[in-house]
Image (cartoon, helix red, strand yellow):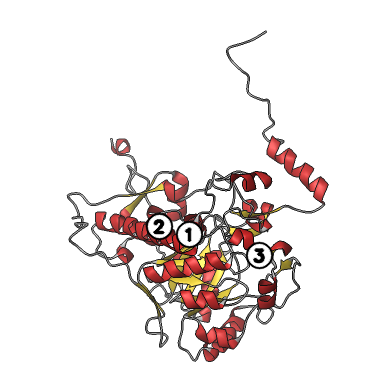
Amino acid sequence: MSSAFTRPPAYSGTWHPDAIEEIQEKAELGRYQIRGQATKRHNLPNFDDLVFTPAGLSRMPLEGYRERCDTKVVIGEGRVSRPLVLERPIMIAGMSFGALSVNAKRALGIAATRCGISTCTGEGGMHPEEREHSSKLVMQYLPSRYGMNPYDLKKADMIEIGAGQGAKPGTGGVLLGLKMSEEVAKMRDLPVGIDQRSGCRHPDWMGADDLYMKLEQLREVTNYEVPISIKVGAARIANDVRIACKADVDAIVFDGMEGGTAASPTIQLDHAGIPTIAAIAEAVEALHDMGKQDQIKLIVGGGIKNGADAAKAIALGADVVYLGTAPIIALNCHAPIYLEDYERLGTTPYECQHCHTGLCPVGITTQLPKLMARLDVDEAADRVTNFLNAMTMEIQLFARSCGKNKVSDLDPNDMRSLTQDVALMTGIPMVGLNGRQPWWTKF
């Protein structure tokens, strides 16, 4: 008997197909799953829940083609002899050689140099190609100490003490054996082809006092010339910011749970950390509590896709946005090419999350020469440059429309919340209320 209407499958709300498939896969493997990219949760509060309230009669907007809108940010100004000068409020996040191919590192470095911003080594040491192609290079100092030596520290333009990652707070890095090539293994002093799991905490400090001493050691190594930041995954962010302030870092870096990764326990991606938008609010409040808002820069990442997200993060209190996934996509991640290789991985473009396998069809997250050759460095660098330029123009567009001639002058008063949840998290008034009770309650 046929019907014009088809009844939807009677899936359980708890035991839906994804949950059943996950249990069956764990029963086969005997371990938790690992994958790349970011959380799959769709119900997180995010930057789309905020809107700008541009100028009208009460404030004058700026002419886009005739009035300047400054984007420069300086980290460590007045604190070190060689501060890091960024021509725009953007940094390329820490992504290691190992997680990324050397061609990807080259392309990111070329694009960042053209745009006057920095790249970051990530875990695993400073690759000579990255230092050559990045005019401003941040070196991560992580618990593993892979590839770490004082000579490379002296070559860096900023040191970033890595203490956590938004995609997997409270755990260390993962690099599976297929990506542990001879060159990667040599830089990390590890066996070729063996899975690498990093420590989750630094072996030589356990608290704020120890952290201050570690900072002093690094400042001595770098002759007090370059700024030093500390990076955490957004979780207990308010207390982490206070501890970083007590240690007197030059910048605090964090990414929310929307941050990406080359490899993480899948369950960690969806069930650990807090959303970026909530983390900014907590971090800014803690920074003000410590009286350090004018001295310590706030660098924020995690799910920032475009200039609107970036401008909103800055308006909430960030000084710089930290981009990882977006530049990788600009390189050509998820591009609908080499479809047969996606099929072999059991996935398709736009949903591929197989960075951890080392079998990246477009040559970005792999160490296999045949796949690496697919990423043309010059073309990839052009694509990332175009993306960064477009994103910068978008940030300036919102600043100008709000009557600001400096991007850094964007503030919470330039926005309204679309949802009650985000209004409560950020303190940004709901649209239509402007902090007041509804008009009808007055009568």
The answer, for residue 275, to whether it is visible in the render is yes
Q: Secondary structure at mark 2?
A: helix
Q: Position of residue 53 (x, y in %)?
A: 29, 50
Q: Secondary structure at mark 3?
A: loop
On the image, which quarter does residue 151 sit in?
Answer: bottom right
Q: Residue at x 59, y 69 (%)?
A: 96
Q: Position of residue 142 (x, y in %)?
A: 62, 75
Identify the mark nearer the N-term, 2 or 1: 1
Identify the mark nearer the N-term, 2 or 3: 3
Sort mark 1 into few (<14), some (14-19) or many (20+) by Cα contacts within 10 Å.
many
Q: Determine whether 361 is above or below 140 in the image.
A: above
Name the amino acid type tagged 3.
Gly
Identify the mark nearer the N-term, 1 or 3: 3
Quadrant in the picture for the C terminus: top left
Q: Which residue is mark 3?
A: 170
Q: Secondary structure at mark 1?
A: helix
The front one of 82 and 57 is: 82
Quadrant in the picture for the N terminus: top right
Name the amino acid type tagged 2.
Phe
Q: CA distance from mark 1 to mark 3?
A: 25 Å
Q: Which residue is mark 1?
A: 327
Q: Position of residue 140 (x, y in %)?
A: 56, 75
Query: Do the numbered discs 2 and 1 sit on residues whose CB atoms are within 8 Å?
Result: yes
Name the amino acid type tagged 1.
Pro
Q: Which residue is mark 2?
A: 387
